[in-house]
Amino acid sequence: MNESTRQDLGLLFLRISGALFLLWVHGLPKLLNYSEQLQLIEDPFHLGANITLLLAIFAEVLCPLLIIAGVLVRLACLPILAVLLIALLVVHPEWTLFEGQFGWLLLIMFSTLLISGPGRLVLGQRFS
């Protein structure tokens, strides 16, 4: 296996594992428990709980699905990074590095994908 193939496999693993983790831990619970989440979600920019929750679901459900497929990966990373930065710097500025470690790790993962791109192992090479 050549170096280029190993890099593509590494990016595929990063894309799928990071996106599935975000989808499973944050996205699906928001989508499947929408009414309950409306009562819990922070609304730091006063857009209303409904719009804030819809934006979070977009970033945590649709964007990870695009990333898994390898479609518009760099573009799909942007809403995720925005939600992570808002959560870490605006909603929970009091968190220590220890308390926010999951968010910071996701920030590192999706920043890496933004910088590197999806690799060659994608469904739609033209749209990656």
Image (spheres, helix red, strand yellow):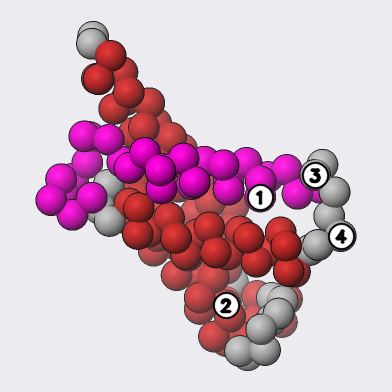
Q: Callout 1 environment at 10 Å: few (<14), some (14 to 19), or many (20+)?
A: some
Q: Nearer the viewer, mark 1 or mark 4?
A: 4
Label 4 residue SS = loop
Q: Residue beneath label 2, please?
A: 53
Range of magenta residues: 99-128
Question: What residue do we see at 79% from left, 63% from top?
Answer: 92
Of all residues shown, which one is farthest toward the left? Answer: 126
- Please say if 18 is above or below 3: below
Quadrant occupied by the N terminus? top left
Q: Residue beneath label 1, please?
A: 103
Q: Main secondary structure of the magenta part?
A: helix
In primary-sequence order, the first of circles 1 and 4 is 4
Q: Position of residue 108 (x, y in %)?
A: 57, 42
Question: What residue do we see at 32% from left, 23% from top?
Answer: 7
How far apart marks 1 and 3 lie (CA) works out to 9 Å
Residue 119 lies within the magenta run: yes
Question: What residue do we see at 49% from left, 54% from top?
Answer: 23
Q: Position of residue 79 (x, y in %)?
A: 47, 64
How far apart marks 2 and 1 lie (CA) works out to 18 Å
Label 3 residue SS = loop
**Residue 25 seen from this side:** yes
Residue type at tag 2: Leu
Label 1 residue SS = helix
Asked where in the image residue 105 lies, by quadrant, the reply is top right
Q: Position of residue 19 (x, y in %)?
A: 45, 47
Q: Is label 1 in contact with label 3 (beta carbons under 8 Å)?
A: no
Q: Residue beneath label 4, please?
A: 94
Q: Residue beneath label 3, please?
A: 97
Tally the numbered discs: 4
